[in-house]
Protein backbone atom coordinates (compact mmCIF):
# COMPACT_ATOMS: atom_id res chain seq x y z
CA UNK A 1 0.00 0.00 0.00
CA UNK A 2 1.36 3.42 -0.93
CA UNK A 3 1.37 6.48 1.38
CA UNK A 4 -1.40 7.93 -0.80
CA UNK A 5 -3.60 4.93 -0.05
CA UNK A 6 -2.89 5.11 3.68
CA UNK A 7 -4.15 8.69 3.76
CA UNK A 8 -7.18 8.23 1.50
CA UNK A 9 -9.45 5.23 2.04
CA UNK A 10 -11.56 5.86 -1.06
CA UNK A 11 -8.44 6.12 -3.20
CA UNK A 12 -7.16 2.87 -1.68
CA UNK A 13 -10.40 1.10 -2.53
CA UNK A 14 -10.36 2.41 -6.10
CA UNK A 15 -6.72 1.34 -6.51
CA UNK A 16 -7.43 -2.15 -5.17
CA UNK A 17 -10.33 -2.55 -7.60
CA UNK A 18 -7.95 -1.82 -10.46
CA UNK A 19 -5.37 -4.26 -9.08
CA UNK A 20 -8.02 -6.98 -8.83
CA UNK A 21 -8.87 -6.42 -12.50
CA UNK A 22 -5.15 -6.47 -13.45
CA UNK A 23 -5.43 -2.96 -14.86
CA UNK A 24 -2.43 -0.60 -14.83
CA UNK A 25 -2.84 2.76 -13.14
CA UNK A 26 -0.77 5.54 -11.60
CA UNK A 27 -0.78 7.72 -8.50
CA UNK A 28 -0.14 11.45 -8.85
CA UNK A 29 0.83 13.60 -5.88
CA UNK A 30 1.49 17.33 -5.85
CA UNK A 31 4.79 17.71 -4.00
CA UNK A 32 5.42 21.46 -4.40
CA UNK A 33 3.66 24.60 -5.54
CA UNK A 34 4.74 28.21 -6.01
CA UNK A 35 2.61 31.24 -6.74
CA UNK A 36 -1.14 31.03 -7.22
CA UNK A 37 -2.33 27.44 -7.66
CA UNK A 38 -5.71 25.84 -7.11
CA UNK A 39 -4.30 22.63 -5.58
CA UNK A 40 -1.68 22.51 -2.85
CA UNK A 41 1.07 20.07 -1.86
CA UNK A 42 -0.35 16.76 -0.76
CA UNK A 43 -3.23 16.73 -3.26
CA UNK A 44 -3.51 13.30 -4.84
CA UNK A 45 -5.20 11.59 -7.75
CA UNK A 46 -5.56 8.12 -9.21
CA UNK A 47 -4.96 7.97 -12.97
CA UNK A 48 -6.08 5.38 -15.48
CA UNK A 49 -3.84 3.84 -18.14
CA UNK A 50 -4.72 6.66 -20.55
CA UNK A 51 -4.00 9.37 -17.99
CA UNK A 52 -7.61 10.12 -17.07
CA UNK A 53 -8.19 11.16 -13.45
CA UNK A 54 -10.36 8.46 -11.86
CA UNK A 55 -10.26 9.69 -8.29
CA UNK A 56 -8.88 12.74 -6.52
CA UNK A 57 -8.00 16.23 -7.68
CA UNK A 58 -4.90 18.02 -8.96
CA UNK A 59 -6.37 21.46 -9.51
CA UNK A 60 -7.84 22.85 -12.69
CA UNK A 61 -7.00 22.12 -16.30
CA UNK A 62 -3.56 23.80 -16.20
CA UNK A 63 -1.76 20.58 -15.31
CA UNK A 64 -4.03 18.05 -16.98
CA UNK A 65 -2.22 17.64 -20.29
CA UNK A 66 1.21 17.33 -18.68
CA UNK A 67 -0.07 14.87 -16.09
CA UNK A 68 -1.72 12.74 -18.76
CA UNK A 69 1.45 12.52 -20.86
CA UNK A 70 3.60 11.76 -17.82
CA UNK A 71 1.21 9.05 -16.59
CA UNK A 72 1.26 7.32 -19.97
CA UNK A 73 5.07 7.49 -20.08
CA UNK A 74 5.32 6.17 -16.52
CA UNK A 75 3.11 3.19 -17.30
CA UNK A 76 4.91 2.41 -20.54
CA UNK A 77 8.36 2.59 -18.96
CA UNK A 78 7.49 1.38 -15.48
CA UNK A 79 9.49 4.31 -14.05
CA UNK A 80 8.15 7.15 -11.86
CA UNK A 81 7.98 10.63 -13.36
CA UNK A 82 8.46 14.06 -11.80
CA UNK A 83 6.99 16.95 -13.76
CA UNK A 84 7.13 20.68 -13.13
CA UNK A 85 4.36 22.73 -14.74
CA UNK A 86 5.53 26.36 -14.78
CA UNK A 87 4.76 29.62 -16.62
CA UNK A 88 6.80 30.29 -19.75
CA UNK A 89 8.78 33.19 -18.30
CA UNK A 90 9.97 31.00 -15.43
CA UNK A 91 10.99 28.27 -17.86
CA UNK A 92 13.03 30.87 -19.73
CA UNK A 93 14.64 31.97 -16.47
CA UNK A 94 15.63 28.41 -15.76
CA UNK A 95 17.00 27.98 -19.27
CA UNK A 96 14.65 25.14 -20.17
CA UNK A 97 11.81 24.61 -22.61
CA UNK A 98 8.60 22.67 -22.31
CA UNK A 99 9.40 19.00 -22.83
CA UNK A 100 12.97 19.25 -21.50
CA UNK A 101 14.08 16.86 -18.74
CA UNK A 102 16.77 18.10 -16.37
CA UNK A 103 18.06 16.09 -13.39
CA UNK A 104 15.04 13.81 -13.51
CA UNK A 105 12.43 16.59 -13.74
CA UNK A 106 10.40 17.06 -16.91
CA UNK A 107 9.21 20.62 -17.53
CA UNK A 108 5.86 21.63 -19.00
CA UNK A 109 4.32 25.03 -19.70
CA UNK A 110 1.52 26.39 -17.58
CA UNK A 111 -0.56 28.57 -19.88
CA UNK A 112 -3.22 29.43 -17.32
CA UNK A 113 -3.68 33.01 -16.07
CA UNK A 114 -2.76 31.94 -12.52
CA UNK A 115 0.86 31.56 -13.68
CA UNK A 116 1.68 29.32 -10.74
CA UNK A 117 4.12 26.41 -10.64
CA UNK A 118 3.06 22.88 -9.73
CA UNK A 119 5.46 19.95 -9.26
CA UNK A 120 3.80 16.55 -9.49
CA UNK A 121 5.22 13.09 -8.76
CA UNK A 122 3.65 10.25 -10.74
CA UNK A 123 4.12 6.67 -9.62
CA UNK A 124 3.05 3.79 -11.89
CA UNK A 125 1.39 0.63 -10.61
CA UNK A 126 1.58 -2.27 -13.04
CA UNK A 127 0.10 -5.76 -12.69
CA UNK A 128 2.60 -8.27 -11.36
CA UNK A 129 4.11 -10.10 -14.36
CA UNK A 130 3.09 -13.70 -14.86
CA UNK A 131 5.75 -16.39 -14.93
CA UNK A 132 4.51 -19.64 -16.47
CA UNK A 133 6.74 -22.56 -15.50
CA UNK A 134 6.06 -25.57 -17.70
CA UNK A 135 7.25 -28.90 -16.33
CA UNK A 136 7.52 -30.81 -13.06
CA UNK A 137 11.29 -31.22 -12.99
CA UNK A 138 13.39 -30.31 -9.92
CA UNK A 139 14.42 -27.09 -11.70
CA UNK A 140 10.76 -26.22 -12.36
CA UNK A 141 9.92 -26.83 -8.72
CA UNK A 142 12.83 -24.67 -7.56
CA UNK A 143 11.80 -21.78 -9.87
CA UNK A 144 8.19 -22.03 -8.69
CA UNK A 145 9.29 -21.83 -5.05
CA UNK A 146 11.73 -18.95 -5.53
CA UNK A 147 9.98 -16.68 -8.07
CA UNK A 148 7.26 -15.20 -5.81
CA UNK A 149 9.98 -13.65 -3.65
CA UNK A 150 10.95 -11.57 -6.68
CA UNK A 151 7.37 -10.39 -7.35
CA UNK A 152 6.32 -12.85 -10.03
CA UNK A 153 2.84 -14.32 -10.25
CA UNK A 154 3.62 -17.99 -10.92
CA UNK A 155 1.43 -20.30 -12.98
CA UNK A 156 1.94 -23.83 -14.26
CA UNK A 157 -0.22 -23.60 -17.37
CA UNK A 158 -0.61 -21.19 -20.27
CA UNK A 159 -4.10 -20.00 -19.45
CA UNK A 160 -5.97 -17.86 -21.94
CA UNK A 161 -7.56 -14.53 -21.11
CA UNK A 162 -4.66 -13.04 -19.14
CA UNK A 163 -4.97 -9.26 -19.11
CA UNK A 164 -3.01 -7.67 -21.92
CA UNK A 165 -1.41 -5.28 -19.45
CA UNK A 166 0.21 -8.18 -17.58
CA UNK A 167 3.53 -9.29 -19.01
CA UNK A 168 3.84 -13.02 -19.54
CA UNK A 169 7.12 -14.90 -19.37
CA UNK A 170 7.47 -18.63 -19.97
CA UNK A 171 10.19 -20.98 -18.73
CA UNK A 172 10.13 -24.49 -20.17
CA UNK A 173 11.68 -26.82 -17.61
CA UNK A 174 10.15 -30.07 -18.84
CA UNK A 175 13.63 -31.62 -19.21
CA UNK A 176 12.74 -34.40 -21.60
CA UNK A 177 9.09 -34.80 -20.62
CA UNK A 178 7.13 -33.18 -23.45
CA UNK A 179 9.72 -30.60 -24.50
CA UNK A 180 8.41 -30.19 -28.04
CA UNK A 181 4.76 -29.83 -27.07
CA UNK A 182 5.67 -27.29 -24.38
CA UNK A 183 7.65 -25.23 -26.88
CA UNK A 184 4.82 -25.33 -29.41
CA UNK A 185 2.36 -24.19 -26.73
CA UNK A 186 4.59 -21.34 -25.57
CA UNK A 187 5.22 -20.10 -29.11
CA UNK A 188 1.62 -20.32 -30.26
CA UNK A 189 0.28 -17.37 -28.27
CA UNK A 190 1.22 -13.86 -27.20
CA UNK A 191 4.05 -14.02 -24.66
CA UNK A 192 6.81 -11.54 -23.85
CA UNK A 193 9.64 -13.99 -23.32
CA UNK A 194 10.39 -17.71 -23.58
CA UNK A 195 13.36 -19.58 -22.12
CA UNK A 196 14.21 -23.28 -22.47
CA UNK A 197 16.04 -25.25 -19.79
CA UNK A 198 18.40 -27.48 -21.72
CA UNK A 199 21.58 -27.40 -23.73
CA UNK A 200 22.01 -25.39 -26.93
CA UNK A 201 22.51 -28.67 -28.82
CA UNK A 202 19.25 -30.10 -27.50
CA UNK A 203 17.36 -26.96 -28.42
CA UNK A 204 18.89 -26.99 -31.91
CA UNK A 205 17.41 -30.46 -32.44
CA UNK A 206 14.03 -29.34 -31.15
CA UNK A 207 14.23 -26.21 -33.32
CA UNK A 208 14.40 -28.37 -36.44
CA UNK A 209 11.24 -30.18 -35.35
CA UNK A 210 9.53 -26.87 -34.60
CA UNK A 211 10.47 -25.58 -38.04
CA UNK A 212 9.12 -28.76 -39.66
CA UNK A 213 5.83 -28.30 -37.79
CA UNK A 214 5.39 -24.79 -39.18
CA UNK A 215 6.69 -22.60 -36.36
CA UNK A 216 8.24 -19.44 -37.78
CA UNK A 217 11.98 -18.92 -37.77
CA UNK A 218 11.50 -15.66 -35.86
CA UNK A 219 9.62 -17.42 -33.07
CA UNK A 220 12.25 -20.16 -32.89
CA UNK A 221 15.05 -17.61 -32.64
CA UNK A 222 13.22 -15.75 -29.86
CA UNK A 223 13.71 -18.59 -27.38
CA UNK A 224 16.60 -18.20 -24.96
CA UNK A 225 18.35 -21.57 -24.77
CA UNK A 226 19.97 -22.54 -22.56
CA UNK A 227 17.95 -20.58 -20.01
CA UNK A 228 19.74 -18.64 -17.31
CA UNK A 229 22.82 -16.53 -16.84
CA UNK A 230 26.14 -18.33 -16.79
CA UNK A 231 26.73 -18.52 -13.03
CA UNK A 232 28.34 -21.95 -13.06
CA UNK A 233 25.14 -23.34 -11.54
CA UNK A 234 24.98 -27.06 -10.74
CA UNK A 235 22.08 -27.85 -8.40
CA UNK A 236 18.42 -27.32 -9.34
CA UNK A 237 18.25 -24.42 -6.89
CA UNK A 238 21.32 -22.78 -8.39
CA UNK A 239 19.98 -23.26 -11.91
CA UNK A 240 16.67 -21.72 -10.80
CA UNK A 241 18.58 -18.76 -9.38
CA UNK A 242 20.46 -18.26 -12.67
CA UNK A 243 17.18 -18.34 -14.60
CA UNK A 244 15.50 -15.85 -12.26
CA UNK A 245 18.53 -13.56 -12.53
CA UNK A 246 18.08 -13.64 -16.31
CA UNK A 247 14.35 -13.00 -16.00
CA UNK A 248 14.93 -9.99 -13.75
CA UNK A 249 17.45 -8.57 -16.20
CA UNK A 250 15.09 -9.00 -19.14
CA UNK A 251 12.20 -7.54 -17.15
CA UNK A 252 14.15 -4.47 -16.03
CA UNK A 253 16.42 -3.83 -19.00
CA UNK A 254 14.78 -5.51 -21.98
CA UNK A 255 16.00 -8.49 -23.90
CA UNK A 256 19.78 -8.89 -23.90
CA UNK A 257 22.12 -11.67 -24.99
CA UNK A 258 23.05 -13.69 -21.93
CA UNK A 259 26.03 -15.28 -23.67
CA UNK A 260 28.15 -12.13 -24.09
Image (cartoon, rainbow, N blue to C red):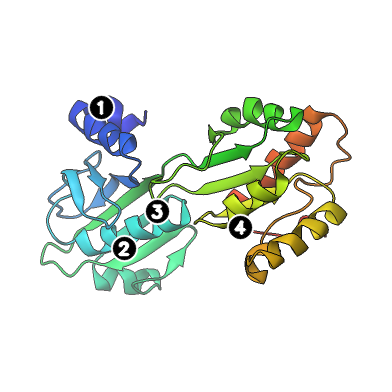
Determine whether label 3 and label 1 are within 8 Å by CB: no
The residues tagged by marks 3 and 2 sit, at their Cα atoms, a distance apart of 10 Å
- At x 55%, y 55%, the residue is 192
The residues tagged by marks 3 and 4 sit, at their Cα atoms, a distance apart of 15 Å
Q: Nearer the viewer, residue 28 or 167?
A: 167
Categorize mark 4 by other alpha carbons within 10 Å: few (<14), some (14-19), many (20+): few
The residues tagged by marks 4 and 1 sit, at their Cα atoms, a distance apart of 35 Å
Mark 4 secondary-structure assignment = loop
Residue behind mark 3: 75
Which comes before the other along the chain, label 4 or label 2? Answer: 2
Q: Nearer the viewer, residue 222 or 55?
A: 222
Mark 2 secondary-structure assignment = helix
Residue behind mark 4: 254
- At x 84%, y 52%, the residue is 202
Mark 3 secondary-structure assignment = helix
**Foreground label between 3 and 2:** 3
Point out which mark residue 7 bears.
1
Residue behind mark 2: 69
Categorize mark 1 by other alpha carbons within 10 Å: few (<14), some (14-19), many (20+): few
Amino acid sequence: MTPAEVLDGDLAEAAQNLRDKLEPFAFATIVRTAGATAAKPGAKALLSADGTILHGWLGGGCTRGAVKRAAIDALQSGAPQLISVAPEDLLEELGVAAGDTVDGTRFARNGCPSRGTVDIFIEPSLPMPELVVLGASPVAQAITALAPQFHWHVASTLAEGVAAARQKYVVIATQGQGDLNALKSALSGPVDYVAFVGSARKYATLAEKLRASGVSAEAIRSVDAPAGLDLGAVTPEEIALSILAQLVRVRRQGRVDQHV
